C-alpha cells in the first residue's frame, strides 16, 4: 500500500521525484471521489461538477527490496465535459501519465473512453502512458453487497475481461478497478502510475547511456561513404 504525507504538504523538496498525473473521463464517472479518497481518505455521495482541480501530495512508494521512493505528485482532476477541450488548454503541461476513467456500470462512459477521450489524450498528452480505470467497483455483483439489492442496470456492469481487452487494443498500460466508496484499489492505481513512470524514465536513461557508449564510425568508413555518395554508388 502507499503511505501518504498529510494533505497540502508542499511539493518543494529538491532532488525528489516529481510526477504529474491527469484524471480524465465523463462527468459523474467518479474521478473527483477517487481523488478525494486518496487525498483526504474521505467519501461523499454528493456530486459537484469540476472545472479542474489540482491536488498535491507526497507518496511513499515501497520497493520489493524493502526500500522506498518518495514521490511528489500533482493530481489534476479535469472536467468531464469534453466540449471544454480542457486537455487542449492544459497541453502545455507535460503529463507523466493519464488515468482514463469510466464507471463500471456505464456502457456509454466505457464507449467514450475508446473514442472521444482517447482521441483527446492522443492529441494533447503527447506520449504519456495511459492507464484505463474502472471506477465504482463496489457496484459489481460479488463486491460484498447482497445480490437481490442490485437492479438490472448495475448487474450489467462492464465485464473486466472486456475492459482489459480494450486497454490492450488501444495501447494502454493496463486496466485496473477501484472504489472511492470503499477505498478498494485506490492506492493501487496511483502506485501503478508511479511504477510506470519510474520504468519509463529508467528505460529513457538506459537508451541515452547506450547511445553515448556506441563507438563512432571509423574515419575509413566515413571516407568510403563520402566517396560512394560523390560517385553515386553504395
Image: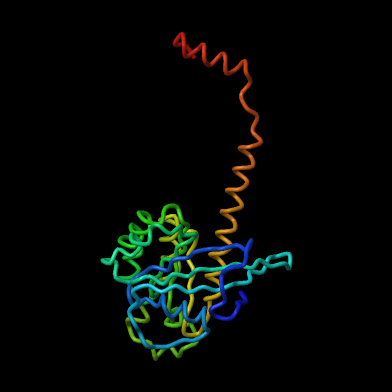
**Quarter of the rendering containing residue 152:** bottom left
Please state, as top left, top right, bottom left or bottom right, where the N terminus lies in the image.
bottom right
Residue lying farthest left?
Answer: 83
Residue located at (50% from left, 68% from top): 74
Q: Is residue 124 left or right of residue 72?
A: left
Decide which of 2, 149 is in the foreground and name it: 2
User: As displayed, is residue 186 above or below residue 45?
Assistant: above
User: As displayed, is residue 82 above or below residue 200?
Assistant: below
Residue located at (43% from left, 79% from top): 136
Q: x, y percentage for residue 153?
A: 32, 81
Q: x, y percentage for residue 179?
A: 47, 79
Q: x, y percentage for residue 156?
A: 35, 77
**Quarter of the rendering containing residue 123:** bottom left
Residue located at (62% from left, 63% from top): 14
Q: Is residue 126 left or right of residue 4?
A: left
Q: x, y percentage for residue 215?
A: 65, 29
Q: Is residue 26 left or right of residue 137?
A: left
User: As displayed, is residue 49 above or below residue 112?
Assistant: below
Colour mapping: rainbow
Amino acid at each position: 500500500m502507499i503511505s501518504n504525507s498529510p494533505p497540502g504538504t508542499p511539493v518543494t523538496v529538491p532532488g525528489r521525484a516529481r510526477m504529474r498525473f491527469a484524471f480524465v473521463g465523463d462527468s459523474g464517472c467518479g474521478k473527483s471521489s477517487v481523488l478525494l479518497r486518496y487525498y483526504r481518505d474521505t467519501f461523499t455521495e454528493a456530486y459537484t461538477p469540476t472545472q479542474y482541480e489540482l491536488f498535491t501530495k507526497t507518496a511513499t512508494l515501497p520497493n520489493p527490496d524493502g526500500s522506498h521512493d518518495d514521490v511528489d505528485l500533482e493530481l489534476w482532476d479535469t472536467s468531464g465535459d469534453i466540449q471544454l477541450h480542457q486537455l487542449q488548454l492544459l497541453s502545455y503541461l507535460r503529463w507523466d501519465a493519464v488515468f482514463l476513467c469510466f464507471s463500471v456500470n456505464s456502457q456509454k462512459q466505457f464507449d467514450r473512453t475508446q473514442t472521444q477521450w482517447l482521441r483527446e489524450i492522443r492529441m494533447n498528452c503527447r506520449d504519456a502512458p495511459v492507464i484505463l480505470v474502472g471506477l465504482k467497483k463496489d457496484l459489481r455483483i460479488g463486491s460484498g453487497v447482497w445480490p437481490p439489492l442490485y437492479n438490472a442496470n448495475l448487474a450489467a456492469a462492464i465485464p473486466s475481461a472486456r475492459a482489459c481487452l480494450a486497454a490492450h487494443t488501444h495501447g494502454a498500460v493496463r486496466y485496473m478497478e477501484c472504489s472511492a466508496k470503499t477505498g478498494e484499489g485506490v492506492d493501487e492505481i496511483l502506485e501503478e502510475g508511479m511504477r510506470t513512470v519510474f520504468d519509463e524514465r529508467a528505460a529513457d536513461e538506459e537508451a541515452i547511456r547506450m547511445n553515448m557508449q556506441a563507438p563512432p564510425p571509423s574515419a575509413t568508413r566515413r571516407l568510403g561513404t563520402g566517396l560512394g555518395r560523390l560517385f553515386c554508388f553504395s
